[in-house]
Image (cartoon, rainbow, N blue to C red):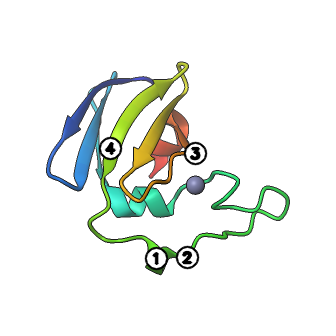
């Protein structure tokens, strides 16, 4: 499933329009907390390293770009830029 359009709804919220017509809405802080990169989740144990409370509620993406044809790379306003969000994961959230 591929996204066809990215829409910024407010400073902190955005939505993805999928090719089947489904629209997923995301709150940036929730998405930032769901980051599965190596510094947020221990790659060996799968244990979450990120403290949800340290993610500011007003966090927002400063840059979103596609990574290949399977994920989005999101750079956040807290400086975190190693997160890749696969379309599969975005679709499930
Ligand atoms: Zn991360």
Q: Secondary structure at mark 2?
A: loop
Closer to us: 17 or 72: 72
Give percent across and percent down for residue 37: 64, 51
Q: Secondary structure at mark 3?
A: loop
Check contact, mark 3 vs mark 4: CB within 8 A: no
Q: Residue at x 41, y 59 (%)?
A: 78
Relative height, residue 76 to residue 2 (above, below): below
Q: Earlier in the sequence, mark 4 or mark 1?
A: 1
Q: Earlier in the sequence, mark 3 or mark 1?
A: 1
- Where does label 3 land, which residue? 82
How far apart, in angstroms, are the residues tagged by discs 2 and 3?
A: 16 Å
Q: Mark 2, residues whose alpha carbon is within 10 Å: few (<14), some, or many (≥20)?
A: few
Q: Earlier in the sequence, mark 3 or mark 4?
A: 4
Q: Residue at x 23, y 56 (%)?
A: 12
Asked if ligand 1 lies within 8 A of label 4, the reply is no
Give percent across and percent down for residue 16: 30, 36
Q: How many marks?
A: 4
Label annotation for residue 54:
1
How far apart, in angstroms, are the residues tagged by discs 4 and 2?
A: 21 Å
Label annotation for residue 62:
4
Asked if ligand 1 lies within 8 A of label 3, the reply is yes
Q: Earlier in the sequence, mark 4 or mark 2?
A: 2
Q: Residue at x 61, y 53 (%)?
A: 36
């Amino acid at each position: 499933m591929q996204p066809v359009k990215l829409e910024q709804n407010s400073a902190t919220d955005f939505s993805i329009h999928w090719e089947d017509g489904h629209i997923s809405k995301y709150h940036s802080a929730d998405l930032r907390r769901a980051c599965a990169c190596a510094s947020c989740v221990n790659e060996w144990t799968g244990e979450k390293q990120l403290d949800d409370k340290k993610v500011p509620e007003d966090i927002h993406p400063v840059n979103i770009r596609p990574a290949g044809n399977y994920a989005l790379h999101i750079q956040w306003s807290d400086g975190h830029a190693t997160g890749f969000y696969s379309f599969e994961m975005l679709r499930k959230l």
